[in-house]
Image (cartoon, helix red, strand yellow):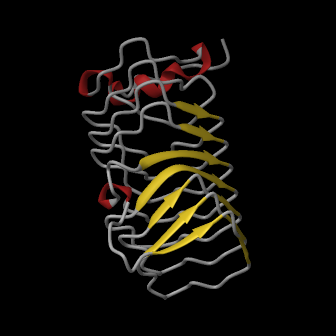
Amino acid sequence: MNSSNDTTLHQDKTFTGVNYADKTLQNREFVKCEFIGCDFSNSDLSDNDFVDCHFKQCNFSLTLLRGTGLKDITFTGCKILGIDFSKCNKYMFSFVFENSFLDYSTFYGTKLRKTKFIGCTLKETDFEGADLTSSIFENCDLTGASFVRSILEKTDFRTARNFSIDPSLNSMKQAKFSALNLVGLLHKFKLDIDHES
């Protein structure tokens, strides 16, 4: 939490349709707030804290989050494109993502244990060095997503699609896969796998 006395606290508030695009927000702390249809594209939310907040149908394209605290945050139906989550406050860092677009974002080296990604697209998303232990990718599109030196132990990929993961480059003990999507683990061998037989 920001210790500055100048921090403005917003608690139990709902913000609807607010346009924060291209703006800088400073010295704010939001607790148990709801944001509906708000535009944060190209905005700078660095060093603000969000705790137990819900974002619905919000736009976070290219938003800056340096030092931003995001604890117990739910994103539903949001555009979260090209965001560098590795710059967030690592001590306030927990999410649920539902039906959101996270394409071209990076979670490089982050701790994402038990994170739920439900019905999301994660195209070209960077998970290099991320700890995704016991996380769930339910009905997610992982086209071009990068998993290198990632911890994928007990991670659930059973309904994920279009992923390419090299088991020799990641820690994958007890990771869960469906027999129908195992081809994503064999990608580097360039095998010709017949799905008809």
**Among the 4 quarters of the image, the one containing residue 180:** top right
Where residue 46 sits: x, y (%)?
37, 72
Q: Which residue is painted at 56% across and 23% down in the image?
A: 181
Residue 144: tell me if it is visible: no
**Among the 4 quarters of the image, the one containing residue 145:** top left
**Among the 4 quarters of the image, the one containing residue 86:** bottom left
Q: Which residue is painted at 25% across and 28% down in the image?
A: 169
Q: Quadrant of the C terminus?
A: top right
Where residue 170 sits: x, y (%)?
29, 26
| In the foreground, 102 or 109 | 109
- Extreme-front residue of the structure: 5
In the depicted structure, whether residue 67 falls above or below residue 155: below
Compared across the picture, whether 86 is left or right of 142 comes to: left
| In the foreground, 144 or 148 | 148
| In the foreground, 156 or 44 | 44
Q: Quadrant of the N terminus?
A: bottom left
